[in-house]
Image: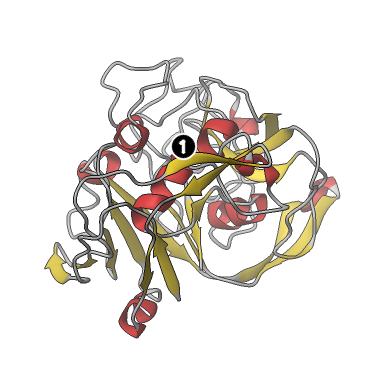
Amino acid sequence: MKVKHKCNDWNILAAIAACFFGCAEVALMSARAGDIASVGASSGNASISSAQTVEYVASSNLVSLLSHRYLVVDLSGGSSAVCFPVSWCDFDPHRGWGDEYKTTKLVLRRVPPGTFIMGEEKTNKYHRVTLTQSFFIGVFEVTQRQWELVVGTRPSYFNDDYEKRPVENVSFDMIRGKELGARWPKGDEVDVDSFLGVLRNRTGLDFDLPTEAQWEWACSAGTESKYSYGSVPDGRYMWYYGNAEQQTHEVGLKLPNRWKLYDMHGNVTEWCLNRNSPLWYGNDPRGFSVGTYRMQRGGAWAVDERLCTTFSRSCGESSDCRVITGFRVVLRL
């Protein structure tokens, strides 16, 4: 497996393994402060250009770590950092995920491949889908502090005690970019100055939004019920119109699903990669390659519980910024 990192300063330290709260920390790259990349132009698209390119070839030890349960990205260096160290964990923290995992660190959980019925069977709008590869997905929705540490801005509407609230008022274009990032599924590239562009450059890992199929599989956690926990709405698991008091809430306060993922129902709707289209079937479906609307899943604080199910779908133009819409990240393996 090749991990590529682009920077203008070659003071790269060797990979380090350490033990911290049960996590094997692997500092993939470390460098002096300097320019990550510059925005160039190629056929009208933003692209990454750098006078010097450091290509890191991960060792077999790093490849073996990909079987671990959790991935953690340390964002504490902030928007001026050159690299964000990456670590891996096998076990849930003894005392649960502390506040740092909602603010200065991103934590993702490994989700197994599988075959499932995508969509609600009784509506006759469903298909059998197979995800052929494991992937990591955010344990929490990306928070306002995490967004701020990556790109240095605070775009959200709900900014009282903002750090642990999910980031909202962010568009698909802000997350992936409106040039290269808008090409998916024709290409997996993102704009260098987008949230994911910065995150990719500073970790050397290709983080992205989930596809609809990945999102629904992760939300269901292998269940077939309307909600990941059963068939009846339950406020212990989600923030919705009936209990949210017209605002977002700190991530991770409600109960998680069976795969220990929080806020899959409610709080904020979550951007997915797919363009607005009928449900697709088969292996690793990617959907339409044209169209300006992108799918959103999960429901939000402002909507009825019936719109917060595992199967509920909504969409928005890629440029839309709404106070009900945020996202979580994935890493495909």
Residue 294 screen position, x and y as percent:
69, 36
Q: In this view, does 28 lie above or below 119?
A: below
Residue extending farthest right: 124
Badge 1 crowding class, 10 Å Cα cut-off, few under 14, some 14 to 19, many 20 or more, is many
* Residue depicted at x 41% and y 44%: 198
Q: Give the image's coloring scheme.
A: secondary structure
Residue 11 screen position, x and y as percent:
20, 60
* Three-letter residue code for mark 1: Asp
Q: In this view, does 105 lie above or below 79?
A: below
Residue 122 screen position, x and y as percent:
81, 49
Residue of label 1: 193
Q: In this view, does 123 lie above or below 27?
A: above
Residue extending farthest front: 51
Q: Which quadrant of the figure has residue 297?
A: top right
**Res 256 seen here:** no
Q: Which of 50 and 222 is in front in this view?
A: 50
**Res 81 seen here:** yes
User: Which quarter of the rendered picture does the N terminus lie within?
Assistant: bottom left
Residue 184 screen position, x and y as percent:
68, 48
Q: Nearer the viewer, residue 155 or 190?
A: 190
* Residue depicted at x 26% and y 54%: 9
